[in-house]
Amino acid sequence: MTDDVDPKWLERLYARDEHAFSKLVLLHQARILALTTRLLSSPSDGEEITQEVFVQAFKHIDQFRGDAKLSTWLYRIAVNLCKNKNKYLRRRRVNESTSLEELHETAQPAPGAHATMARVGRPDELASARQLHDTVRIAISQIDEAFRECLILRDVEELSYEEIGEITSLPPGTVKSRIFRARAMLRERIEELLGRTKS
Amino acid sequence: MTDKAEDDKEHNDVRALLKGAIPSPDPDAEARVLPQVQRKLYARSRGKFYRDGWSRAHSMPSVFLMAATMLIVALVVYLLLGPRGL
């Protein structure tokens, strides 16, 4: 993460300087947007929460003391807001489990999926690549949120264990064990789901 | 040992699988973040922040560019009208 914070710029942020804050948004928006979209599994929710992350950052910038990276601090806000949003969605039962068949009808392939799919030529191979991605999406949504969060921060965002620890307020050892268990759970769920679709 | 070295090949496979499957942001969403954040801050601060077009400019160069343009226009107007008015 890029994070050499100029003390003068930080002073301007503390003073709620609008141009300094706009620069903060432009610097970090892409990564925050990617993270929130992945944590919420929804581009529209991700966009909404990303805006809220920066609104909260503007409001509470004086709580940033410079002991962590600014990006880590923003990530922490993002993770907490995503947790709240997921809780809200669960309560509203929007996040209910989706069957594989339903997902096939409604889901658009993830932009990252094209690289894999482009290498596959035959229609049956294309279908199975798509089915695998759909299966992974369902499997990841079924993993406990605390584990999923660590897995995404590590395997998708490629953060270090220390950074994940700072973001989630967990000791690095706990972070490592959660990632290890999340990978095992993911593998288990994928195998289960693939077994179910074959039978 | 680095973090990356601790992850074996199997984990790299999980990583590749996840990256391909998990949704990515809408490609146009990035351009909407700053204007939306500015709008929300303007509304929630009841007009205290981001109250004018200048503060909503995406970057400082656009402010300087506009100021320079205004100066040039003023200079041209002065050169055209100023000496004759004497």
Image: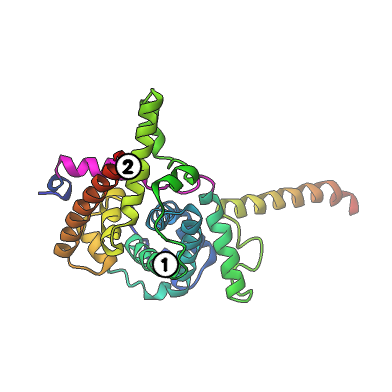
The vertical placement of A186 against A22, above or below, is above
Between A125 and A47, the one lying in front of the other is A125
Between A58 and B44, the one lying in front of the other is B44
* Residue found farthest to the top: A122
* Residue found farthest to the right: B85
Disc 2: which residue: A197
Spatial CA distance of label 2 from label 1 is: 26 Å
Query: Residue at 48% of width from left, 66% of height from top?
Result: A52
Q: Is residue B68 left or right of residue A181?
A: right
Picture coordinates of residue B9 (x, y %)?
A: 16, 39
Disc 1: which residue: A90
Q: Secondary structure at mark 1?
A: helix
Q: Secondary structure at mark 2?
A: helix
| Residue B59 appears anywhere in the view | no
The answer to whether residue B5 is magenta is: no
Magenta stretch in the rendered image: B8-28
In the image, what residue type sits under mark 1? Arg
Chain on which label 2 sits: A
Graded by Cα atoms within 10 Å as few (under 14), some (14 to 19) or many (20 or more), the crowding at tag 2 reads few
